[in-house]
Amino acid sequence: PTEATPLRAPPADGAAGSYRPCGCAVRQRASAVWLVVLAVMLAIASCEMCYTTLPSVLPTLRHYTGSEAVVTLLPGIGTAGRALGKASQILVTYAVGGTMTLVAALSVGGVATLCFPIGGIGIYAVCWFVANFCAAHVWGASTRVAANWVDERYQGRAFAGLGVAGDS
């Protein structure tokens, strides 16, 4: 089964490693669901960190770089990255799938966030754009995963949990 085959029902062939959440072969349905829940939680935490960190670090960045451009450039770059990410999230999630989009958002966005403090204004701008672009894909991918992999009787709770977890 792939993402198009929801985790709501057991695998048809019953073979080991039939579930493939996030590209990993998993034998048990419960383990597959927990792996996806972990990916969704990490992605939402990453998304929220990306959106709330900048206001607290701008004064420090201005102090260390000695440039006022940091204060005016980074919020605009982040907004552009988020806008482009929101515009492309439907196409990316449809083409690649929800779980792979979450894995990519976590991986690429995480690397961009880690690389953010190593350079000057140019590196700050590129990394902040990429981190916001990736964070914008979290909500669409999370809702696709929840719609496909959560039992019908728990979908209301799953979407409520996504709504409470973040405003993305």
Image (cartoon, helix red, strand yellow):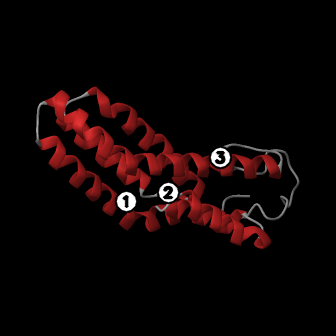
Label placed on residue 138: 2
Q: Residues within 10 Å of mark 3 (few under 14, many from 20)?
A: few
Label placed on residue 146: none
Q: Residues within 10 Å of mark 1 (few under 14, many from 20)?
A: many
Q: CA distance from mark 3 to mark 1?
A: 22 Å
Q: Amino acid at mark 1?
A: Gly
Image quadrant in which you'd find residue 113: top left
Q: Amino acid at mark 2?
A: Val
The residue wearing badge 1 is: 85
Q: Residue at x 41, y 51 (%)?
A: 134
Per the image, label 3 sits on a secondary structure element best described as: helix
Determine whether label 1 and label 2 are within 8 Å by CB.
Answer: no
Per the image, label 2 sits on a secondary structure element best described as: helix
Which mark's residue is nearer the viewer, 3 or 1? 3
Per the image, label 1 sits on a secondary structure element best described as: helix
Determine whether label 2 and label 3 are within 8 Å by CB.
Answer: no
Q: Is residue 52 above or below residue 89?
A: above
The residue wearing badge 3 is: 38
Q: Is residue 80 visible?
A: yes
Q: CA distance from mark 2 to mark 3?
A: 13 Å
